[in-house]
Image (spheres, grey):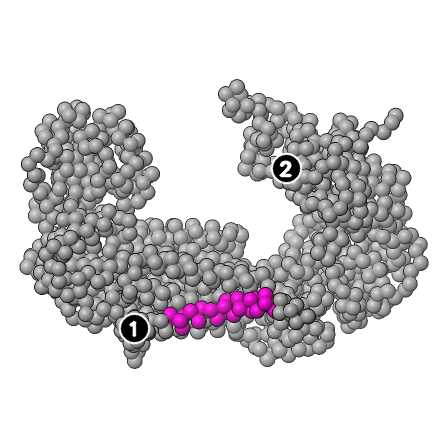
Amino acid sequence: MAPPAEVLAIRGLSKTFPGVRALDGVDLVLRPGEVHALIGENGAGKSTLIKVLTGVYRPDAGTVEFQGRQVSFATPLEAQKAGISTIYQEVNLIPLLSVARNLFLGREPRTRLGLLDFARMNREAEETLRTYGVRVDVRQPLRTLGVGAQQMVALARAVATDARVVIMDEPTSSLEPREVETLFSVIRRLRDAGIAVVYVSHRLDELYAVCETVTVLRDGRRVHHGRLSELSRLDLVSTMLGRELGEVRAEGLTKFSGDHHAADTEPVLEAEGLTVPHKLHGVSVSIRPGEVVGLGGLLGSGRTETAKAISGALPIRSGKVVVAGTSLRGGSTPGAIRAGISLLPEDRKSEGIVPGLSVRENIALAALPRLSRFGMVSEARVDKIVNTFIERLRIKASSPHQKVGELSGGNQQKVLLARWLAMNPKVLLLDEPTRGIDVGAKAEVQKLVDELAEDGLGVLLISSDLEELIEGSDRVVVLKDGAVVGELTGEDVTEDTLMRTIAGDAPATAATKEVATDG
Amino acid sequence: MQRSIHRPHLLARPVVVALAAAVALTASACTKSEDDGSDKQKSSASADTEQKVVTPKAGSKTCTIDAYGAKKIDLKNATVGFSQSEKEANPFRIAETQSMKDEAKKRGVKLLTANAQSQFSKQISDVQDLLAKGADLLVIAPLNSDGWEPVFKAAAAKKVPIVTVDRKINATACKDYVSFIASDFVEQGRRAADQMIEATGGKGEVAILLGSAGNNVTTERTKGFKERIAEKAPDLKVVFEQTGDFAREKGQQVTEQLVQSKPGIKGIYAENDEMGLGAVAALKGAGKKAGAVKIVTVDGTRNAVNAIVDGWISGVVESNPRFGPLAFQTLDSFTQGKEVAEDIIIQDSAYTSDNAKQDVGKAY
Amino acid sequence: MAEATVRTAAPLDKARILQWLQTYGVYAGVALLLIVNIVITPHFLSAENFRTQAVQVAPVIIVALGMALVIGTEGVDLSVGAVMALAASVLALYLGYGLLPALIAVALFAAVAGLANGALVALLGVQPIVATLALMVGGRGIALVMLPQLEDLHNPSLASLGSGDIVGVPYLILIAAALAVLIAFVVRRTTFGRQLLAIGDSRPAAQLAGLPVRRVLMVVYVVSGLLAAVAGVLATARLQASDPTSLGNLMELSAITAVVVGGTPLTGGRISIGGTVAGAVLIQLLTATLIKHDLPPSWTQIAQAIVIVCAVYAARGRGKR
């Protein structure tokens, strides 16, 4: 059987943003009835590719051929009308309109008088949705539906608009397991109907369950494409992360000393069975004083959520966090901070620094109550702390009164570290501490983390930089789809075992396999 | 009243409840107003305060029930609907509504009332509501002069006669409505000018505190005043015209600026009593003596008339809000088949130092 | 080479001018209006006149101080005018017990109003403009239910509060000045002030830094309500009459204008108390100038609009930098 003609052919697509080459000569070919996995880590270029395809961005170079004709969509609506539908993580329908109205929005059936034919609309909507496993009163507003059902309505709507290509951007991130099954059956039906599907997800199990072909992006380039079944999970992970298995690499690329002398004492932090709906399923982590514990896993595996759940920024449904023997009340950031937990958030610019305030104010921010008497700030005490940390962390600013927003990324990160160190924390949660900062500052931050661990702090390190994670951590807890799938200790803290554990097809010897038991 | 017991109770309540509770408590008079006990019986309409009509000029138009096309009814058994335009938050509106109620009670007529709260769309639906509730006759104090067609249509369908008070509707008399009863605002301005001329001796510089911009009352009271000044006392110069928005505080603030920059000002014409009382407050604050600057105002509220007695205000031209007796009398004559005038202009009285003391009881 | 330097220097200078304008423009404007008036307005240069201007602007300054705090948290309080009316009503209703008990009742009502705003914003996450709109509409309604019409007040203590002075300086001016100094101190020197600015600049960061975000927001709205009530009491004392119908009408706009013209950005994170006071004075002088020269009232509105546009333009230049 000859392969059917291409429905979509992308060739040599490039897109540059100031300072970043988001897409660099990317090719992607789709045939009718093909379910194609599009994967890559953060910043690999997936979302840029989707946005170019659907008319949000205009490419700098390259062509898009759709159904044999070269196209260039100016708006997402144009793309949708031509037959390329996109289903985003967040459902983009109208919450207050009825389910049926949403389903038929823009192509409502009319009566002979030109009025909306509600009876027919409701009847057809009900029939259509039943085939998607959604049984609801279609006259109710959309927002009364669960997220999964809403996603099904979005999907049904996308398919009903005569789509030839359906792009799904992490469609299962908020679905229950049962709903995921329904989604898969819908995808298979689309496939059988000759519709091409681009499936973006970080969940390897899902990819292997439903996808036929795969394109792997890394740093804006296509680094692999082909049939998914011909690619082992391990190969897939290593391709994504850009690490060849067994690759010989120079030691000491990072400034980590590698081994800390974790006191053989009671853990300073014990997190047990952290569960957050759709995000974490019983994650447990423990850290001893002076130990750096790495949190490994792909994007979306629950690393950031684990850190946030521990620090009280993300309310947990069940589980507990114990710091130095005292149990924390979940969902309270001030409580966690008082207990000695400090979080350096992943999104430094919007969740970390207060850009309009000075270096001085930023460093003193969390410790203000301790630096005050009767609600009045003691400037002398603030100055003392601020000067100490500017010196110790070698923060480069024109003066303590310079705005933090004007500093380089590395110095911003050091300011945040200073803010937390001023609180004398017991545990530091570092979420991507070196992302987006230059090489010199990166080395400095890494060295600082080392020193802090030497001083007896417990450190949780999250990093997409495998080198950093492996060299910096004494132990690595590996997460996948919101659950712990293994733990690397001692000799096993290597990139190879990490990737194997993530891939899940060759568990590391030391890995303690845990099964998610979330209902 | 157990004030001393209630108040701590209020203090102790949970905060959110307190706000709601306060409203209820206020309604039950659990607060102690400073003016408690003072005579607040302003509503009782005596024969003295009744509106009198300017003798109609010969040949002015009249209307009869036959010409209008309604059926004769006995007012005693009829239901009258009254639609008030603005919130009863100023003395004029309070007295107007009260006078309607008092007159209905006196005549034993059933009265339905509605208040549009200064929203025209509400007034339209108010009137339609009154019709639906079975009003046989309508008295309307219109908020706007235009946009009444839906009401006329609905009233005509039920053959319900309409009398409008205090503000005119742009429509055909004796077809869309029967009569219009009101003061002549231009005439009020003229009479204020007369008082100003008398108080100042017809010489010097005077100021006007204008009402709200774009209001026909403002325009007409200004027109009459300026016309009469130009005609009778050319030596009296209007050197200052600023709006006080019919509000006391604004009148005070503007007057403060005025007396600073024009210390030689002889008189102030305030287009309502509130602004005039604001001017009095400003003059007091500036250390002026009563009567040093002559103030003439329009309306005839009790506070303003009292200020004449105290010597701060020279004269008040009345704008009588007590439309009740005249409106009912008009409806009575009309429903009996008699002729009524299409435009009924009220003869407003005035207060000066000569009559303020004995007539203060007539003020509203 | 020299040419290139010149070319790059030009926009830099423009940015610097804009920044200077945003910080000091309001003071320059006040100075300019003073000079112009001294030259062209008869009887302007007199203690009596300055006293009048200061007394008239005092309530606006007091309300604007609270507004500055709210705007510093990236919020806005539209209910201040209604709270002034509410204060006037409550004052009139409880004055029979004496001035002090009446003031306590006023403070209580204002605090409840502020708490209602604060709860909507801080606890329920309602947009400040929507949350305070409710009270802006409802507050005046409640005030009118309590006191349906203007009522003259004859309390000697209240009268002296409104028109009394200490060595020639009216209480109103002293109170406004004292409050301005107090609020400036709170913003600059207290934990609360710094936390407030951090919350206004970046709420997620403040939250993750463990700041008591909800508590700070609640307090800010309560303070705004209390300051509006103080202004309402003082205006009522000056008028010697409680006028819930028109007292505080459009005060929210005057206060926001004063704050914005004074160089406090609507995006939060920065508060200029000195600028806010100067902003209120600028608008007052502008209005006074036009009234004293008997120009049509519509000119005042146009002139105010021009000042606001200038202020917003200067702020925009700063934001882009």
Residue A136 placement: quadrant:
top right
Q: What span is in magenta?
A: C9-34
Residue A34 disc label: none
To which residue does mark 1 refer? Answer: C44
Q: For label 1, count other residues whose C-alpha is less than 10 Å away and answer few (under 14), some (14-19) or many (20+).
A: some
Q: Which mark is residue A77?
A: 2
What whole-number distance in Å separates the C-alpha atoms at marks 2 and 1? 64 Å
Residue beneath the point at 47% across and 62% down? C311
Q: Position of residue B135 (x, y in %)?
A: 23, 30
Q: Is B263 drawn above or below residue C93 in the view shown?
A: below
Name the quarter where the N terminus of chain C is drawn.
Answer: bottom right
SS label for mark 2: helix
Position of B54 with respect to C318 (left or right) is left
Is B237 or A381 nearer to us in this picture?
B237
Q: Position of residue A440 (x, y in %)?
A: 78, 68
**Mark 2: amino acid:** Leu
Q: How many marks?
A: 2
